[in-house]
């Protein structure tokens, strides 16, 4: 072999490696301008020690192009936009790094977010993971916001069972798929619901405050409460949470009836009686609101509905505040049509109607239905899996009901 045959491959390889190194350095500088969490830990793409530029006893040159790392391979991964925080499922979130780069917005208001969208900062985003509280930055996901989103964004993974912050019809028109976490919240929300039912039935709220103020049960003592045994609970919205609540209410000796848009199968209903809306209002001792909020269900319970109820009915709401007219509820409590109420959600959260705050017969919680470590973790993992499914399979694991046929 001639001396040229020995030298030229070495020169060629050294030149190629130097070019790759320069390309990496430039790519690192560019990538450092993007806020990336989880997917790229540093502005450099190297994941193993660099090969030496000079021969050593343990290093042998290779002329196969497949053995040289492609400096742009990781840049070809799709991006996921994180709207909100990951508080618990850190391992599951970190696993996204193998299939996507995760970025976060710099915006801290809706106007800023729309401008950031239009700037092209999110042009490689294909999916977004959003939390309920991210509405503070983006505002509602409505037609205006959807029009500003990058054209490549096709999936919105919402971390919550209720998704009234998202205009699903507008998303459908823009060919954007939406998912929620429909069953991860069932146990915790139904537990909270049962707590509110018991507290409202027994009238515990008045004495809770009296005790803390040094008045024991109260001066005078509160009226006697009611036992759950033998009472009829009417569930408006017999979805996963409603069915879970039915089982818990049964353990306290309550009989369940329900109303849905459509009657459930015998297997799903678990023996609960299906009744009309008006019959549900007229014959329930306890009315539990477990239906989603949308244009059709807003203020589904208002003055006319309260007048159809039993005198002294107990009402609980762990769904969304606006399914019930709070002004009408306050008046029904004041005139005795409603004996007590247990509420975890409100029309204008975090604002609460002063007529509810000032009524000692109302049990109030600040939207704590899913406020447990276990449930929050399950919700995050579920939502992350929706993102993974979107990227790997091109479809969401749990699309919202309106899009199941898409």
Image: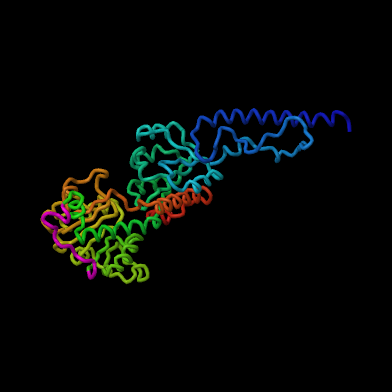
Residue 158 belongs to magenta span: no
In the image, residue 211 lies at what x, y percent? 19, 53
Residue in the foreground of this view, choosing between 339 and 401: 339
How many numbered discs sit on the rendered protein?
Answer: 0
In the image, residue 52 lies at what x, y percent? 72, 32
Quadrant in which the C terminus is drawn: bottom left
Left or right of 102, for residue 358: left
Residue in the foreground of this view, choosing between 389 and 360: 360
**Image: magenta residue range:** 215-230
Colour basis: rainbow
Left or right of 397, for residue 274: left
**Is 253 placed above or below 405 here?**
below
Dominant secondary-structure state across the stretch colored magenta:
loop
In the figure, residue 282 lies in which quadrant? Answer: bottom left
Quadrant in which the N terminus is drawn: top right
In the image, residue 37 lies at what x, y percent? 50, 38
């Amino acid at each position: 072999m001639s001396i040229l045959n020995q030298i030229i491959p070495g020169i060629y390889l050294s030149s190629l490696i130097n070019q790759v190194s320069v390309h990496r350095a430039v790519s690192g500088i560019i990538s450092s301008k993007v806020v990336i969490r989880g997917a790229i830990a540093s502005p450099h793409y190297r994941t193993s020690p660099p090969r030496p530029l000079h021969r050593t006893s343990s290093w042998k040159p290779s002329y196969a192009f497949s053995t040289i790392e492609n400096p742009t391979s990781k840049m070809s991964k799709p991006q996921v936009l994180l709207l909100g925080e990951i508080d618990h499922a850190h391992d599951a979130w970190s696993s996204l790094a193998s299939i996507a780069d995760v970025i976060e917005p710099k915006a801290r208001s809706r106007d800023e977010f729309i401008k950031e969208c239009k700037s092209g900062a999110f042009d490689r985003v294909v999916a977004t993971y959003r939390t309920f509280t991210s509405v503070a930055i983006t505002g509602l996901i409505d037609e205006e916001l959807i029009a500003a989103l990058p054209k490549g964004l096709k999936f919105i993974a919402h971390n919550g069972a209720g998704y009234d912050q998202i205009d699903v019809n507008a998303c459908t028109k823009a060919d954007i798929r939406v998912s929620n976490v429909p069953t991860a919240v069932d146990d915790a929300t139904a537990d909270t619901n049962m707590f509110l039912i018991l507290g409202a039935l027994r009238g515990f709220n008045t004495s809770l405050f009296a005790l803390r103020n040094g008045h024991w049960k109260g001066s005078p003592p509160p009226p006697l409460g009611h036992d759950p045994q033998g009472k009829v609970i009417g569930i408006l919205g017999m979805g996963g949470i409603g069915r879970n609540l039915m089982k818990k209410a049964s353990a306290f000796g309550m009989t369940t009836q329900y109303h849905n848009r459509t009657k459930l199968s015998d297997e799903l209903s678990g023996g609960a009686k299906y009744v009309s809306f008006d019959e549900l209002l007229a014959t329930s001792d306890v009315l539990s609101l477990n239906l989603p909020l949308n244009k059709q269900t807003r203020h589904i319970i208002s003055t006319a509905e309260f007048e159809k109820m039993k005198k002294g009915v107990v009402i609980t709401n762990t769904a969304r505040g606006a399914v019930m007219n709070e002004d009408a509820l306050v008046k029904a409590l004041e005139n005795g049509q409603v004996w007590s109420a247990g509420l975890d959600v409100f029309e204008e959260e975090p604002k609460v109607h002063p007529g509810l705050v000032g009524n000692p017969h109302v049990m109030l919680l600040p939207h704590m239905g899913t406020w447990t470590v276990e449930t929050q973790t399950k919700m995050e993992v579920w939502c992350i899996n929706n993102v993974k499914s979107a990227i790997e399979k091109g479809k969401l694991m749990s699309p919202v009901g309106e899009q199941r046929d898409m």
